[in-house]
């Protein structure tokens, strides 16, 4: 075979992945143009790129442009990645294969065919890094590029969105969409219309963070910390007063617990119909008390509760739990309630992505979620083989009976590798574990760097050195960190070659996982940090029967029989517990995704209708026409004294005010219903009778929505009749209709246990399997 070799054949057979042959066929033609293009002067590349007749011709031009601009000639496999993305698919390419460049060439091609491209990066730091790194290539090809981050001003954002290609964190793109929702003058709009979205680390965004709501909130009174309930639940004992399920997602009061709570609350009946509010508060407090663990799910720093992002294992900036839960944890920790505000609008990452007519992406690990990507987004995954075969040695798991024995063994393993100077990267599951391990390493006299909750730029610099001779780096979740780990460290070029070879001779980077993740995909992301570009490397996971993955997903796993003195489990069967636990966790997550998605789907449809309506109101005279025909006398009266453009603007402001107000209220009511239906269904045992909580929810939501638009019209007419409207316009403030004085955005870590409705679903699912 001429090109990618027999390895490709093997990948072609992989079920459920896109066929590479069609792209592979184009590679020889791309190669054939290389010599001729090498002679063209730089200033001809804009034209060459613009005039490229097809994707293959563009790739030939793009390859030569990258070679000139970066000194890196894209490998065949990188161009295959580009072609895959140009077909609207997800390219799976291992870490270190050069996805940044593959993606940039795809983005440039889309831009040159007249499309507007947004590249979703993992964070501010990477958005900026990638935009600047690739800028010389874009410039040679005649494509404009911009980037934004959290700190960008509206003007900077508008300018960046005006570029043909913009790099931005997905959350910032979402926040711009949300903020644009409140604008009353089209000139103030910031975000560009959704067209092409190219997603880096696509599985993190599309699967792990898909259901995270991005929230726009407006100033309002904060919800009070419920100190009373925090005090009540503090006195409750696990097992006696409450029980939590194996998944650690739900806690419920036992009869004894209910009784104790009732006593503490002054002898009320918490299950009485008029005490539903008390019961809800009690449940929220119980969840905060029993299920959210300090230093695992959150940390307390500078007098604030700061969430840990479960899939990234580090402090999630600007994230909070839904309001009640956030306040409950604050009360549990005895700290002041943070400002909460009223939710004006929110959108999930999944809904945001669905707005784009063309979506494509790249990641090191997509194939195991291929079914979900197809089902939820209609995206195919193409698995692209590495440029040079991966020779990393992935060892089988080492299983121990207890967590303590496991940690001891890890330290011994690190010591052995370190003695020779081989760099070690230890991936932990959470921050508490990082710190525990760091203490053990210190006690063993092993110098190391611990990486958690630093800022992204610093982090990147540390990660870049993890491959240096003698380095020991401890880090939580390497997913989506996007930094390349070169053997020998990131030092200056000539030194680097010598350093690289020295470390390569020691076996390359040794990755040690302190526990398997909930999904094998996340394990592979960690392993993939080693063995880049054909380098030698190794990986191993240490696991214990006490690991949460096992205890929560396979509580009935058999007790191992053959255990060595150091705790090492030798039963061949015991190994299966781990993969079984991962399959169980995977299934549960899929079910949750599906249900949550169904819940958001209807809200999303309603939101689209409202937005469409709003846009028409904002851009034309529809508001005045509507109000004028409802209140003809008032219109005649105003028309005498107020210039018509001012009157139209006043009408617009009035209707937009009521529409935005109505939508925020609608969202709040839906959230209450969602919670309420779940509780009702649980309380009456209705689920056993086959009632579907989602159907109940949908019926109520549709009813409410129909009345929403009517109400907006009525309220607008009322304001139009009564508010002071002069040649200066309308004074909404004077009419008591204040828009929020300040807005801010944050990401809601979705209720980790799900809402009451989710819990109802879970029961329903369990009920079904038991039947
Ligand atoms: P990925 O995102 O796939 O993990 P990156 O885009 O971060 O990989 O690139 C990894 C490293 O490989 C970078 O240092 C980059 O400069 C280098 N690189 C990418 N493409 C090439 C190439 N064609 N030739 C040489 N080096 C390359
Ligand atoms: Mg990358």
Image (cartoon, grey):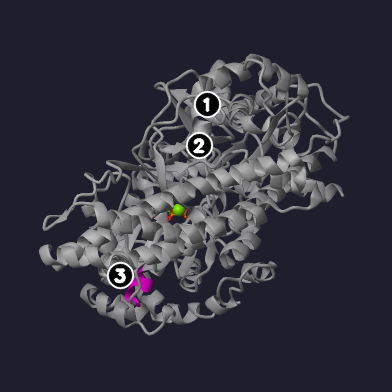
- Give how far across and how far down residue 430 sits, in percent: 57, 32
Rendered residue at 23%/76% (across/down):
41
Reading the image, the residue beneath label 3 is 629
Report which quarter residue 647 is drawn in: bottom left
Marks 1 and 3, the one that precedes in the sequence: 1
Judge by depth and name the residue closer to the eye, 90 or 170. 170
**Residues at marks 2 and 1 touching, judged by CB atoms closer than 8 Å:** yes
**Residue 184 visible within the image:** no
Is the residue 390 above or below the residue 328 in the image?
below
Tell me the SS state at disc 2. loop
Distance of mark 1 from mark 3, alpha carbons?
52 Å
> Which one is in front in this view, the residue at disc 1 or the one at disc 3?
3
**Residue 231 visible within the image:** yes
Reading the image, the residue beneath label 2 is 321
Tell me the SS state at disc 3. helix
Reading the image, the residue beneath label 1 is 329
Judge by depth and name the residue closer to the eye, 607 or 465. 607
**Number of other residues with Cα within 10 Å of mark 2, as a class: few under 14, some 14 to 19, many 20 or more:** some
> If the image is split into quadrants, where does the N terminus sit?
bottom right
Distance of mark 2 from mark 1, alpha carbons?
9 Å
Marks 3 and 2, the one that precedes in the sequence: 2
Q: Which residues are magenta?
A: 108-113
């Amino acid at each position: 075979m001429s090109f990618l070799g027999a390895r490709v054949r093997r990948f072609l057979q992989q079920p459920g992945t896109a066929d590479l042959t069609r792209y592979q066929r184009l590679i020889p033609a791309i190669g054939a143009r290389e010599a001729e293009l090498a002679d063209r002067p730089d200033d001809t590349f804009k034209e060459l790129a613009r005039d490229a007749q097809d994707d293959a011709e563009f790739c030939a031009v793009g390859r030569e442009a990258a070679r000139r601009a970066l000194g890196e000639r894209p490998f065949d496999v990188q161009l295959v990645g580009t072609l895959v993305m140009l077909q609207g698919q997800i390219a799976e390419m291992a870490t270190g294969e050069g996805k940044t460049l593959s993606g940039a060439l795809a983005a440039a091609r889309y831009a040159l065919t007249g499309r507007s491209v947004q590249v979703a990066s993992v964070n501010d730091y990477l958005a900026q890094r990638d935009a600047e790194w690739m800028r010389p290539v874009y410039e040679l090809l005649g494509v404009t590029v911009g980037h934004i981050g959290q700190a960008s001003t509206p003007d900077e954002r508008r300018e960046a969105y005006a570029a043909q290609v913009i790099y931005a964190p997905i959350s910032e793109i979402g926040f711009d969409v949300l903020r644009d929702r409140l604008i009353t003058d089209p000139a103030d709009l910031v975000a560009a219309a959704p067209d092409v979205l190219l997603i880096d680390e696509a599985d993190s965004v599309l699967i792990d963070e898909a259901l995270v709501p991005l929230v726009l909130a407006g100033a309002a009174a904060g919800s009070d910390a419920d100190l009373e309930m925090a005090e009540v639940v503090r006195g409750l004992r696990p097992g006696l007063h409450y029980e939590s399920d194996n998944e650690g997602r739900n806690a419920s009061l036992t009869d004894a617990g209910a009784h104790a709570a009732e006593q503490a609350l002054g002898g009320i009946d918490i299950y009485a119909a008029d005490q539903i509010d008390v019961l809800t508060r009690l449940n929220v407090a119980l969840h905060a008390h029993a299920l959210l663990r300090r230093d695992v799910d959150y940390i307390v720093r500078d007098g604030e509760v700061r969430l840990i992002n479960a899939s990234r294992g580090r402090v999630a900036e600007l994230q909070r739990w839904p309001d009640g839960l956030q306040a409950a944890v604050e009360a549990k920790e005895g700290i002041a309630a943070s400002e909460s505000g009223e939710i004006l609008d929110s959108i999930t990452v999944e809904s945001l992505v669905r707005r784009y007519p063309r979506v494509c992406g790249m990641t090191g690990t997509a194939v195991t979620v291929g079914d979900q990507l197809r089902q939820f987004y209609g995206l195919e995954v193409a698995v692209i083989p590495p440029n040079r075969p991966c020779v990393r040695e992935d060892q089988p798991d080492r299983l121990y009976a207890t967590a303590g024995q496991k940690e001891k063994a890890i330290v011994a393993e690190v010591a052995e590798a370190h003695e020779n100077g081989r760099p070690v990267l230890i991936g932990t599951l959470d921050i508490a574990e990082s710190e525990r391990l760091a203490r053990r390493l210190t006690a063993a006299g092993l110098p190391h760097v611990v990486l958690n909750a630093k800022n992204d730029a610093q982090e990147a610099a540390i990660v870049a050195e993890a491959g240096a001779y003698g380095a020991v780096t401890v880090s939580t979740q390497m997913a989506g960190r996007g930094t390349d780990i070169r053997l020998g460290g990131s030092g200056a070029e000539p030194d680097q070659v010598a350093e690289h070879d020295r470390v390569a001779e020691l076996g390359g980077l040794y990755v040690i996982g302190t526990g398997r993740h909930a999904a094998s995909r996340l394990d592979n992301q960690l392993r993939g940090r080693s063995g880049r570009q054909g380098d030698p490397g190794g990986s191993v996971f240490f696991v214990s029967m006490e690991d949460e993955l096992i205890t929560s997903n396979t509580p009935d796993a058999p007790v191992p029989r053959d255990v060595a003195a150091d705790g090492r489990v030798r039963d061949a069967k015991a190994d299966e517990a781990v993969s079984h636990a991962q399959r169980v966790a995977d299934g549960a997550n899929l079910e949750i995704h599906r249900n949550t998605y169904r819940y958001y789907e209807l809200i999303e449809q309603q939101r689209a209708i409202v937005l469409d309506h709003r846009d028409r109101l904002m851009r034309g005279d529809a508001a005045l026409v509507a109000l004028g025909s409802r209140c003809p006398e008032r219109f005649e009266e105003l028309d005498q004294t107020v210039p018509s453009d001012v009157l139209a603007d006043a009408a617009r402001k009035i209707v937009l005010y009521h529409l935005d107000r109505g939508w925020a209220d609608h969202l709040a009511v839906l959230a209450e219903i969602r919670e309420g239906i779940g509780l009702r269904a649980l309380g009456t045992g209705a689920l056993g009778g086959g009632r579907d909580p989602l159907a109940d929810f949908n019926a109520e939501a549709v009813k409410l929505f129909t009345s929403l638009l009517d109400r907006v019209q009525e309220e607008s007419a009322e304001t139009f009749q009564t508010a002071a409207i002069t040649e200066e316009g309308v004074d909404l403030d004077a009419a008591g209709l204040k828009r929020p004085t300040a807005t801010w955005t944050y990401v809601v870590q979705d209720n980790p246990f799900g809402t009451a409705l989710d819990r109802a679903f879970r029961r329903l699912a369990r009920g079904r399997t038991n039947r």
